[in-house]
Image (cartoon, rainbow, N blue to C red):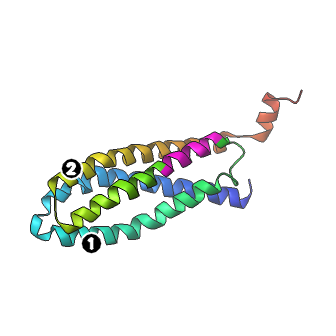
Amino acid sequence: MNAMVKWTLLIQVGATLAMVGLIWFVQVVHYPLFSEVGRDSFRRYEMDHQRLTTYVVAPLMLAELATAVMLLWWRPSAISTPWVWLGLVLLGSIWIMTYAVQVPQHAALANSYDEDIQRRLVFGNWYRTFAWTARGGIVLWMVSQVISFSPAQHLLRNPAP
């Protein structure tokens, strides 16, 4: 396996698994606690939340997206293309959900706290949580295929006709 393939997969796995852990923390701890901030301080809290979260999330999401696309060209031979496409479809849906639903909800909350919007934010984020968890499973499966893949065993099991 050449260096480009190896680094593409390693960065993909690292970024994806970091996002899986982060999304579960956000879903189970962070978003539900929004309701405890208090109306008077919520606007400032939400603005700080958005700014500070971007520092953590943006590099991970961009690395994940870049390497997910790169895997179409630089993927280990043990990983079939449909798995790469499945991961990309999930990631595309996560990005769409993020920018079409979550970001506008955060923008509305930055204007003023609204219990209904906060509830919808938590509920809608379950999709991203499950989609990222599925992506985590896919990248772990990819790693398992690379670790267990042996070209010699492959040739012995599948001799040329």
Circle on res. 48: 1
Q: Residue 31 appears in which quarter of the rendering? A: bottom left
117 sits to left or right of 129: left
**Residue depicted at 32% across the width and 53% down the height:** 25
Query: Is residue 83 one of those drawn in magenta?
Result: yes
Q: Residue furthest right?
A: 161
**Residue depicted at 80% across the width and 38% down the height:** 152
Number of residues whose C-alpha sits closer than 10 Å to that of mark 1, classed few (under 14), some (14–19) or many (20 or more): few
Number of residues whose C-alpha sits closer than 10 Å to that of mark 2, classed few (under 14), some (14–19) or many (20 or more): some
Query: Between 51 and 101, which is closer to the camera in this rendering?
Result: 101
Query: Is residue 79 one of those drawn in magenta?
Result: no
Circle on res. 119: 2
Q: Position of residue 113 (x, y in %)?
A: 16, 62
How many numbered tags mark residues here? 2
40 sits to left or right of 56: left
- Magenta range: 82-92
Can residue 22 be seen from the camera position used here? Answer: no
- Could you say whether the residue bearing mark 2 is in a helix, strand or loop? helix
The quadrant of the picture occupied by the C terminus is top right
Query: Between 74 and 13, which is closer to the camera in this rendering?
Result: 74
| Residue type marked 2 | Arg
Q: Position of residue 81 (x, y in %)?
A: 66, 43
On screen, residue 54 above or below 132: below
| Residue type marked 1 | Asp
Q: Position of residue 159 (x, y in %)?
A: 85, 29
Q: Residue 35 appears in which quarter of the rendering? A: bottom left
**Residue depicted at 61% across the width and 55% down the height:** 69
Q: Position of residue 71 (x, y in %)?
A: 64, 53
Give the mark nearest the N terminus, 2 or 1. Answer: 1
Q: Nearer the viewer, mark 2 or mark 1?
A: 2
